[in-house]
Amino acid sequence: MNIIVNKADVADLSPAIESVHIRLRLTSRMADELLRRCQGLKEIKFTPFAVSQTDPKVLERLAMAGVRTTTMKGGSGRPVELSKAQVEAIKIMRANRLSYRKIAENVGVSHTAIAKHCSALVKYKRWREDY
């Protein structure tokens, strides 16, 4: 998969490319260069941020050129896997009313991973988190 972040990345593409991944806003100049350079381009995959920042006219131009555009769905990164010992430690620390950041420091993962895991454990979510 060829990832495009800026115009220099478009200039480095091979003409035989059929699919590219756009991570940032696609400008009309970049789209023109992409269509000119890659004659066999069939699909462009956008991140949700890239689609929101790209002008709809550019997306229409790509559609008229016969290029299928799709928005990638999914998380922002690799999912965090916790061992059973870590899960038990998280439950104990959370029962002792430690914050997500303190638990994250002790367990060694990000505080957002702790927050997601704890919210999955709670059947009924409270309107605010106790710190």
Image (spheres, rainbow, N blue to C red):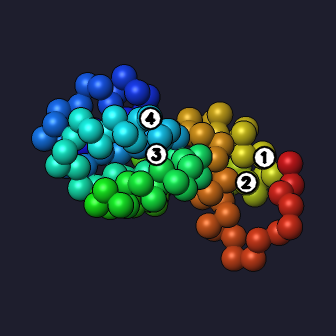
Q: Earlier in the sequence, mark 3 or mark 1?
A: 3
Q: CA distance from mark 2 to mark 4?
A: 52 Å
Residue 5 point in image, percent of width and height: 43, 32
Residue plotted at (44% across, 35% down): 29
Q: Amino acid at mark 1?
A: Leu
* Badge 3 density bin: few <14, some 14–19, many ≥20, Cα 10 Å: few
Mark toward the viewer: 1 or 4: 4
Question: Does 120 appear above or below 44?
Answer: below
Q: Which amino acid type is shown beneath numbered disc 3?
A: Gly
Residue of label 2:
94
Mark 4 residue type: Arg
Residue 25 in sight = yes
- Residue 128 position within the rendered picture, expressed as x and y whole percent measured from the top left: 86, 61
Kindly identify which residue carries mark 3.
77
Q: Are marks 1 and 2 in contact (CB under 8 Å)?
A: yes
Q: How many marks?
A: 4
Residue position for label 1: 98
Q: Residue 127: image x %, image y %?
A: 86, 67
Q: Secondary structure at mark 3?
A: loop
